[in-house]
Image (cartoon, helix red, strand yellow):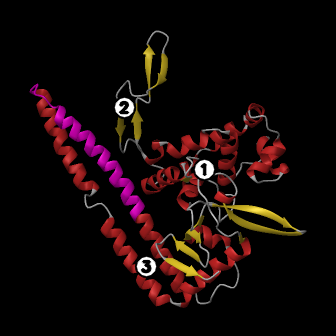
Amino acid sequence: MSAFAGILFCVLSCNTLSIVSEMKHISDLLKQNGLAQKDLAQQVGVTEVSMSRYVNVDRTPRGPILANIARVLHTTTINKILRNEKYIGDALLQKTYTTDFLSKTRVKNNGLVPQYYVEGNHEAIIPKEIYLQVQEELVRRRVVKTSANGKKRSYSCNHCFSQIVICGECGEMFRRLHWNNRGVKSIVWRCISRLESTGLECHARTINELVLQDAVVKAINQMLGDKSSYQAQLQLNIASVIRASQVTSVENIDENLMALQQELIQKAQSKEAYDEIADEIFRLRELRQQTTVDTAARDEQIKRINDLQDYIAQQTTHLTEFDESLVRRWIKQITIWDDRITVELKSGVSIDVNA
């Protein structure tokens, strides 16, 4: 989440003109989608006055708000920015190609013409590690969960508990509901299998949001109350992450690629067959890309664990109230059982709470 937002803000700071230009077309996009400014403001989560300022380009929306506007209006500007390899100094050549040199007609290259990826083509404005973390986050957000009936659940960040509260009985997600029971209003979370047809029969309990908040506070306090044990567990988790990482390094792959490319040139000059070498070069390039992504994911996981260790060491008192930011920062999943709630942290630690 932090990497996604970080690159978004970084890119926005370098593309103000592009964003302002896009905002000028919001009125047209509203008409295309059959929405009023008021409707857009409600779906994005801002006031109608703020939305009016964004539409009139009197104010530039912050990263998360801009991302929500793009989601609601189905625009692709943000996605193009987040996937653009030029921000890390690389260049993908022949994304388009000319079909008619007289009319100079160019079309998107869907594989009919070879493409060439050039690394270090120019100076980067975004660290490659952050870019790779963003690609990983984009993949994670594409499909959060697929139900037993095949229905795909898309990403949502409307609430800190969205899509991280999971049913221990059927494995479905919990959904947030506003209840009005005999005039008593409350906010509860209920398994989706009990709200719509998912192909699963479920009898999971409905849980009040205040109970969920209290379970999170208890889990974190339980960890703070036994610092030495959890610090030792986190150290074991770091060792586990390192052991599970790729043994082959990017440097070794680069050396093999360089040697194969030299061999390919020699065979081409002597008019010998080089198909096997070319296939191996393509395989190594794919392996290099995957290794780079895996390394970035490993480094991010280790960073999360180290950050949690620092938090445990620096926190001198127990939590007295619920903090939404701690959920977004530390918690990966909350599983609801009949007799307990399991809070799983992004660092790999799981804590059971009686609730």
Is residue 349 rendered to the left or right of residue 340?
left
Residue type beneath disc 2: Gln
Circle 1 Cα neighbour tier, 10 Å, few/some/many (<14 / 14–19 / ≥20): few
For label 2, the SS is loop
Q: Are marks 1 and 3 in contact (CB under 8 Å)?
A: no
Q: Looking at the picture, tell me which residue is in the foreground, 181 or 59.
A: 181
For label 3, the SS is helix
Residue farthest toward the top in the current orientation of the protein: 102
Question: Looking at the image, is 241 positioned above or below residue 99?
Answer: below
Pointer 1: what residue? 154
Residue type beneath disc 3: Leu
Image spot of residue 235 (x, y percent): 39, 80
| The disc label shown at residue 115, or none | 2
Measure the C-alpha gap from mark 2 to mark 3: 44 Å
Q: Can you say which quadrant of the picture contains the N terminus?
A: bottom right
| The disc label shown at residue 234, or none | 3
Place residue 193 in its image quadrant: bottom right
Decide which of tag 2 and tag 1 comes sooner along the chain: 2
Which callout, 2 or 1, points to the residue nearer the camera? 1
Image spot of residue 90 (x, y percent): 40, 43
Residue farthest toward the right in the current orientation of the protein: 183
Decide which of tag 2 and tag 3 comes sooner along the chain: 2
